[in-house]
Amino acid sequence: MVRQPLRMPPAFRPAATKPEALTAPVRQAATYSGPWRLGRRAAIVVLIAGIALWLADASLRPKDPACPWSAALAHRWAAWELNALTWFYDARVHIVERDAAAGQVQVESPWGRFWAPEAGSDTDGRKLVAYLIAEHVWMSRRSAEEQVRPGETVIDCGAHVGTFTRMALNRGARRVLAVEANPANQECLRRNFRAEMASGKVVLLPYAAWDAEMQLTFRLAGGNSGSGSAVLGVGDDTIRVPARPLDAMLAEAGAGKVDYLKMDIEGAERNALRGAMQTLRRDRPRVMLESYHLPDDPAVLPALLRQAWSGYAERCGACRADARDGALKPYVLYFH
């Protein structure tokens, strides 16, 4: 007996499906113009608008001639980067000891331990050390080739508690001469570099850098211990400090050839440069000037340097918006 294959009744047979019917949903999905396409277009519009606003912010602000367009266009990114670095180091600087009698704290940081004046209505000692480390890292990232080199003799004018001095030593400086006017900061420097001072690798010059030998009225800033000034009206409390030309200080200290000069002295940079003309003419050191303290610093400071040597080439390290008038001005200028 031969068995016949079973045949399904017509009602139970699957309908034949054409290939076109299977690919139609795929084609429909490929040509779908729903929320995803609209969202992508909106993102492109937002991106273009953001770029336009960024360019307008830099181009519509007044801009100092010393601030190049490359730095002007990057000023908001530069400000964000400094804030991010400040946050990063603030989380990594901790108080390890307090000297209440001296009004100082010792902090542990990625760069080692520092004593610093504790008081500061805006920025206390711990936060200030974190900010200064962040600031030095920020500036060195933006101008790596303008930093201290191994074997150099360095003048840290406005040494504060020694964060730049420490960076210079870490970079291989042969010797650092730290110029600091504030007696409280001088004591911190003595504590922070006791061994280096004993060996002669660090020399403290406890004077204000000026263009003449005299006694100056020095204003103590209540906000933080790094903002005291003989020029700016930063606080009500004052002390008298001895001031000397850098030429006289360096000659007395036997500094020899100066390779690198850093100045951050709260508006007194022009006075200090006038008192360093012999050194600048003789040694032609590379120079780092923080140039935002007085409105005309970006014009006056380079002119003074070129009085000493006309061959100085200038480079802007970073620009920022001046709080006084909103104009973009150099934060730091380098000369070589």
Image (tube, rainbow, N blue to C red):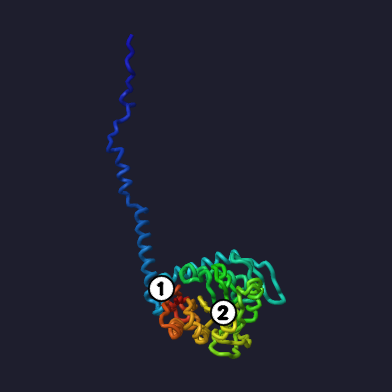
- As rendered, which of 120 and 46 lies closer to the eye? 120
Secondary structure of residue under mark 1: helix
Question: What residue is at 39 percent from the left and 66 percent from the top?
Answer: 50
- Residue 5 spot, x, y in % from top left: 33, 17
**Mark 2 or mark 1: which is in front?**
2
Q: Quadrant of the N terminus?
A: top left
Give the structural element (helix, strand or loop) at label 2: loop
Q: Quadrant of residue 16?
A: top left
Label 2 and label 1: CA atoms lie apart by 38 Å
Q: Where is residue 239 drawn, in percent x and y?
A: 63, 86
| Residue at the limit of the structure toward the top, as seen here | 1
Q: Residue at x 55, y 77 (%)?
A: 156
Residue drawn at point x = 61 percent, y = 78 percent: 204
Q: Are marks 2 and 1 in contact (CB under 8 Å)?
A: no
Question: Which residue is label 1 attached to?
Answer: 72
Relative image position of residue 134 (x, y in whole percent): 54, 68
Residue 122 visible, this angle: yes
Query: Which comes sooner in the sequence, label 2 or label 1?
Result: 1
Query: Residue under circle 2?
Result: 255
